[in-house]
Amino acid sequence: VYRLHGRYHEMAPNVVPMDYTKDPDVKLPMQLIINMPELKENPFKERIVESFSDDGEGSLSFNDFVDMFSVLSEMAPRELKAVYAFKIYDFNTDNFICKEDLEKTLNKLTKEELTEEEITLVCEKVIEEADMDGDGKLGFADFENMISKAPDFLRYCFKEK
Amino acid sequence: SFSREAQIFVDKFEGALGKGKGKQFYAYKVMMTKKWMKFQRDFENFKTACIPWEMKIKEIESHFGSSVASYFIFLRWMYGVNMIHFGLTFGLVMLPEALMGKPYGSLPRKTVPRAEEATAMNFATLWDFSGLAQYSVLFYGYYDNQRTIGWLKFRMPLSYFLVGAGSIGYSFMIVIRTMAKNANDDGGGDDTSFNFSWKMFTSWDYLIGNPETADNKFASITTSFKEAIVEEQESRKEENIHLTRFLRVLANFLALCTLAGSGYLIFFVVRRSQQFALEGLENYGWWERNEVNTVMSLLGMFCPTLFDVISSLENYHPRIALRWQLGRIFALFLGNLYTFIIALMDEINLKVRHLRPFTLEEEKIVKYNMTIWEASLYNGTSPENSTAPPILVDPADVPRGPCWETMVGQEFVRLTVSDMMTTYITILIGDFLRAVFVRFFNYCWCWDLEYGFPSYSEFDISGNVLGLIFNQGMIWMGSFYAPCLPAINVFRLHTSMYLQCWAVMCCNVPQERVFKASRSNNFYMAMLLFILFLSTLPVVYTIVSIPPSFDCGPFSGKTRMFEVIGETLELDFPSWFGKVFGYASNPGLILSFVLLMV
């Protein structure tokens, strides 16, 4: 935790106090956080920061910062990771991954290299594969059911540096 | 909320560390587990870094798809096999002879004849692998038939024979083993549920921090999606069965016509070249002398393109279309190979018939002639009376017998070298110059060069794979007669890997329809096995049926090459062993055993 605090502090030394015993209310804006080397290349960096932020706009207090790193670390349980993954991919925060969310995810993953019909095809296939209750979008239950069977999910985790 | 629960959990953890000794041990255990996991991950990274060219191949895979990458993986595997082959021939055949055998110039077979001495060191002669190169450890003819050489009593002829047999046996084993391993892997199957969902949600690697790696990852994700989309589209396609069937039958008929045409052309050209040979090659220019080679290369260049055009009639899934293409080109090259062997056999027969005097009795005549010639140096001493002290004769002046093994070895080496040159030049001109031309002349040309003709080239998987397989067939056939061949091939594969990796990344564009190579490379392996079998047949035939030349090589003086084993058994092993082996060494039994192994 001390190392995390060091990283948090060095991002904005004049704002973040060294002494946290009095539980001050300090928040860092999203711009600073997405420039961290671990997050810089990630296409979902904004979504990651937003989903851990209390006020929904992306500013993280130190508590939120620690939460983010702990969920992304190796020690976090799988269910917790699934919850946060669902939040990350849910762009419009309506607690469902609908077709527009899928399209946005796909564009971020392929840097918009696919054509319109390819995108539509992929999104249709995803909904066809994972939607169990037939409402045309993925609820958390559908998502978790699909993710728990994936072999690669646990591998791509974040290591605390 | 979840974050509150997680925070309480973390606090509990922190608190536990501070109190009591039991908790300290727990903390220690946790730290060791963390260190162990880190060590495991680092070791995995190290192992991956040790695999040669892994990064290059991953980069190619992310930009061009798994089918193009499978060619490079195959190339790398071939390189490994050739390295082992090279190790065997170099370490057990060439090195002992170079270190412990009689040096150059001590025996007639080891010296350049006086007649050729003037040109022996010319570059042109060396490039042609005659002259000094011919009379060295590189070729069969240099080796002496002494049973043991040097102070280690290294049994050279036995070693030569065993290395030849051993490398063939090893190649069989490794090809079959790889096929078995691939067959096991294939059990997974390509249709998994949640295919697209997993690709979408789990393909990004959150550990990536380097922008170049990120670029490659994006490309690989895009390619992976495209592959999956092609699979999906193929499975959804509707077909008009009758039209498709008719078109496919038509396409096969056209392919057969092409094959028959090329076979007849080769046959015609070989006949002509035999006629030229009879009339003496000096009367003809460069074209007539190299007609067979050139025609074969040209056929090899143009027929695959023809097959490509024909296959567009067939409308298959790209992976299946690739297999048909491979099969047809395979048949084409097989025809070429068969004709080449016939031509070679003919040439040997021609020389042997022309020099038929050099059969057993005539060998005696030649030896008699040689003794007379030696004796004539004593100024008229009668040849039967050989009590005079021997005069030192320069080995370069001694007349030689024919050495067909070296000649065969030379042919194979020349073929390999010319093949290598052709490939490199084709890559440079066909891919690189074409790309340069399209890129720079596009501004001042009437039509759009990049989208129309000629545009950038795609990587030709089938042509390259088959080239690799047939090249390996040549090596297997020729390395018994020219121990230097595996070394040349290792060099060729090494440079080819770098050149082709560079050419692919720089001059080629990915195919329009990227498809996933089926996980097993068993199709390539099956072809390789077939070629291996075909190329070892002539070698086995010569070992058991044709007498070795009497004047050169480690088996000179014996009636058959495999007698070296019988000799070793008699002289080195206890007698009962020799009897058992005597029964088993019937050539017919050996041949059928080899066939059975396949």
Image: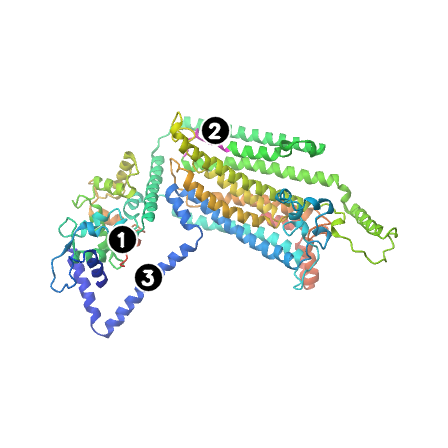
Residue displayed at 45% across by 47% down: B73
Picture coordinates of residue B474, whole percent (x, y): 58, 44
Disc 3: CA contacts within 10 A as few (<14), some (14-19) or many (>=20): few
Marks 1/2: CA–CA distance: 56 Å
In front of the other: B596 or B480? B480
Which residue corresponds to mark 3? Answer: B37
Q: Residues within 10 Å of mark 1 (few under 14, many from 20)?
A: few
Secondary-structure class at tag 3: helix
* Chain of residue at mark 2: B
Q: Residue furthest top?
A: B446
> What quarter of the picture does the N terminus of chain B occupy?
bottom left
Query: Magenta span covers which residues?
Result: B304-316
Q: Mark 2 and 3 residues: CB-CB less than 8 Å, in contact? A: no
Q: Are marks 1 and 2 in contact (CB under 8 Å)?
A: no
Residue highlighted by disc 2: B251
| B177 magenta-colored | no
What residue is shown with label 1? A37
* Residue B517 visible in the snapshot: no
Rounded to the nearest angstrom, the CA distance separating label 2 from label 3 is: 57 Å
Report the mark closest to the observer, 1 or 2.
Answer: 1
Q: Chain of mark 1?
A: A
